[in-house]
Amino acid sequence: MRDSEVETRPRLAEEFRRLRRGRGLHASGLAERIGPLLTELLDPPADATDRELRRRLRVLVDQLTSGFPDDRREAVLSALATDERAANRLSDRTAKLAAESNYAERTVRRRIHEAFDELAAAAAVELTGRDREGGWYLRRLDALLRLDGPGPEVTEKRTIVARRRDGLERIRTRFSVPSTAEWVLPETDLQVSARYGAVITKLARKSDALFEMEIEFPEPLPFGREHEYELVFRLPPSWPLEPYYAMVPMVDCDAFRLRVRFGLDRLPLSVVCLDGLEYQEFRGRLAPGRTVRLDSFGEAALSFERLVPRRMYGIEWLPAEG
């Protein structure tokens, strides 16, 4: 049986403290420096390189500190040297942070210590909670949105990792349709099918634009097992939709790859990337973001890593008409 959260926290604190020494995450030999609890949280492949371990650590730290006050979050990132440009000695990073914050170095060292205690507490909650009902996370989501047909079609290839000790047989997941404020979606059913790796046992419409699915796997997935399945969503042409597609991760997600194909006869006036936008800040037409270039086929390709839960990642466009 796993140790309690209280028992796990000091061990995680020590493992994090070990990582911040020297050049932090940019020191060589990361595999030897990462402790057993962090290894379980990161779940790296056996042949993971320092680069891959560094990426996973950044994702984990980003997720764990997403709700921290800015000064606490900055203390963690600086001490761990998550930015390669700050990959010098810990004492140098501490002095730089002190100068930028106008605090004495002794005060900054105390704040770093407190921030790492908070980081360890968040990691302990995550680690001890992974055995709960529905325990799983997304290692990768590959999505293709086609807008060159009679109606929108989304294909999502999902690679999940089981986090239940007694085996993961099924999961619940949601899919929402970005309906316009002026229209109520008709009762026409959303068409969803599983191409491989799973079957959809339940599909319920929770609200006008929100659907919930229960997905069952061929066999119970043991703890740590990776599994891939693919879903296809087809929306009736009659549905009036807002012009965006976004993933808002409610579970951990390591990577998201998105490709969108517009019809050459209906290319948008402009396209922007939604990259970690706070969901409540999204207003549409158009959100602040970098411009996305379409290729000669009318396609856009985007990729995201280090996703933060409950933020938006995807694409928004301004249609040529209306």
Image (spheres, grey):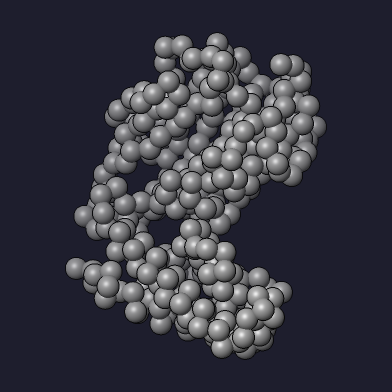
In the picture provided, is 41 more to the left or to the right than 322? Answer: left
In the picture provided, is 145 more to the left or to the right than 212? Answer: right
Name the residue located 41 percent from the left edge and 31 percent from the top edge. 194
Quadrant assignment, res 6: bottom left
Name the residue located 40 percent from the left edge and 34 percent from the top edge. 174
Q: Nearer the viewer, residue 194 or 234?
A: 234
Please provide percent x and percent y for residue 268. Answer: 75, 26
Q: Is residue 98 visible?
A: yes
Q: Nearer the viewer, residue 83 or 148?
A: 83
Please provide percent x and percent y for residue 278. Answer: 56, 45
Please provide percent x and percent y for residue 72. Answer: 53, 69
Q: Quadrant of the N terminus?
A: bottom left
Q: Residue lying furthest left in this view?
A: 1
Q: Quadrant of the C terminus?
A: top right
Position above or below: 224 against 109: above
Please provide percent x and percent y for residue 234. Answer: 50, 22
All told, the count of numbered labels is 0
Position above or below: 259 against 102: above
